[in-house]
Image (spheres, rainbow, N blue to C red):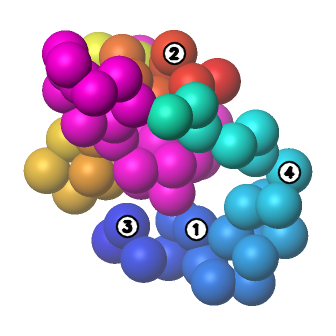
């Protein structure tokens, strides 16, 4: 399911438009950020299915709906 939400040709067009990630701190790096493509899958899922951000299936999309909402 998640593969058809963001096909490779769409990702190739969107990826150059995303800002670069800031470098992680050395001493307290914190949690690893979610993948940008997974966040885009969550955004597309909400737009296609017309569901709430809380209803995004994190197992299928790759990140939670809240993470996708923050990235939006």
Q: Are marks 4 and 1 in contact (CB under 8 Å)?
A: no
Q: Are marks 1 and 3 in contact (CB under 8 Å)?
A: yes
Is residue 21 visible to the viewer in this orientation of the structure? yes
Going from the N terminus, do you reach mark 2 or mark 1 first?
Answer: 1
Where, quadrant-wise, is the N terminus in this rendering? Answer: bottom left
Q: Which residues are magenta?
A: 24-52
Q: Which mark is residue 17?
A: 4
- Residue 25 in the image, given as x and y percentages of width and height: 35, 23
Which residue is labeled 1 in the image? 6
| SS at badge 2 | helix
Residue under the image location 51 percent in, 19 percent down = 69
Q: Which mark is residue 2?
A: 3
Disc 4 vs disc 3: which is toward the camera?
A: 4
Disc 4 vs disc 2: which is toward the camera?
A: 4
Residue under the image location 75 percent in, 84 percent down = 9
Residue under the image location 25 percent in, 36 percent down = 32
Q: Is residue 55 above or below residue 19?
A: above
- Residue 15 in the image, given as x and y percentages of width and height: 73, 61
Going from the N terminus, do you reach mark 2 or mark 3 first?
Answer: 3
CA distance for labels 2 and 3: 19 Å
């Amino acid at each position: 399911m998640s593969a058809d939400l963001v096909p490779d040709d769409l990702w190739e067009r969107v990826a150059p438009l995303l800002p670069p990630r800031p470098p992680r701190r050395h001493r307290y790096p914190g949690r690893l950020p979610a993948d940008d493509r997974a966040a885009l899958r969550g955004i597309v899922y909400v737009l296609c299915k017309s569901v709430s951000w809380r209803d995004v299936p994190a197992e299928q999309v790759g990140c939670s709906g809240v993470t996708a909402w923050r990235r939006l």
